[in-house]
Amino acid sequence: MKAFTKTILGCALCALGAFTSVSFAAPNNAAVVYFTLLHNREAGDPNGVGNTQRVAQAIAQQTNSQLMEIKVAKLYPPTYDETVDIGRDELDANTRPAVAADGNPDVSGYQDVYLGFPNWWGSYPRVVATWFEGQKLAGKNLYVFMTHGGSRFGDAISDLEEALPNSKIERVIALNDRNCRNMSDEELAQEVADALAELE
Ligand SMILES: Cc1cc2nc3c(=O)[nH]c(=O)nc-3n(C[C@H](O)[C@H](O)[C@H](O)COP(=O)(O)O)c2cc1C
């Protein structure tokens, strides 16, 4: 892949008045598609920023890409533990929760897609499968990022490779949820920049 030289004027660096050049091969002008629980549960916060969303925003900003969100049609319950149990049931039954009308990103115009989601029981939330099965992803490049509570990528990459054998799948970053919540914008931007710099 052609190497780009990207000048990162992240918010943090701008704030510092700094000007940093980083060389990496991460695709620009891509789609950044993500799912985050905060926007998909009762008593969630549609205006809040979920963990995976935070990473998605940094990737979109640094690669000049289009941010898009997957949303479920039927919200998860307000309690976290109940949602954890439902997530397990959905994985076991390999269900396909319906996507919301305004949460079904069309990536037909993009060759490169950054796809991000929280680790749910070692894999991707099943609504992500509902979404990708509705898209034509064969021949596209998928750059996967995740947030997690300790399991990092889990089996998500191999599960995606199995489900999407005709897509090129590469991992970008798996960020711990505590780090996601506690890192400053500057720290998070740097983590993401470092991960993007590793892409081949
Ligand atoms: C249904 C469910 C299952 C989860 N399973 C795992 C898991 O197996 N391993 C793990 O490390 N974290 C797990 N987590 C924690 C989330 O991956 C983590 O908190 C993530 O950062 C949440 O991202 P979000 O705010 O974008 O939804 C789970 C969370 C939920 C709601």
Image: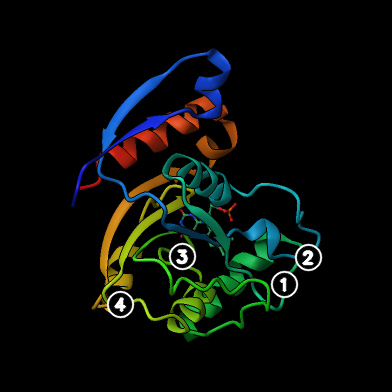
Name the mark nearer the viewer: 2 or 4: 4
Q: Tell me the SS state at disc 1.
A: loop
Disc 2 or 4, which lies upstream in sequence?
2
User: Badge 4 is on which residue?
Assistant: 164
Q: Tell me the SS state at disc 4.
A: loop
User: Badge 3 is on which residue?
Assistant: 121
Q: Is residue 69 left or right of residue 47?
A: left
Whole-Å distance between the Cαs marked 2 and 4?
31 Å
Cβ–Cβ below 8 Å for labels 2 and 4? no
Disc 1 or 4, which lies upstream in sequence?
1
User: Badge 1 is on which residue?
Assistant: 75
The image's mark for residue 35 is: none
Any atom of ligand 1 within 8 Å of the CB at mark 3? yes
Disc 1 or 3, which lies upstream in sequence?
1
Percent x, y for residue 87? 56, 71
Name the mark nearer the viewer: 4 or 3: 4
Q: Is residue 145 left or right of residue 127?
A: left
Whole-Å distance between the Cαs marked 4 and 3?
20 Å
Q: Quadrant of residue 25?
A: top left
Q: Please name the residue shown 51% across and 25% down the image.
A: 186
User: Badge 2 is on which residue?
Assistant: 42
Q: Please name the residue shown 59% across and 58% down the image.
A: 36
Instruction: Judge whether 158 appears above or below 80 on screen.
Output: below
Name the mark nearer the viewer: 2 or 3: 2
Whole-Å distance between the Cαs marked 1 and 4?
26 Å
The residue lying toward the viewer, choosing from 98 and 103, is 103
Q: Please name the residue shown 41% across and 63% down the image.
A: 122
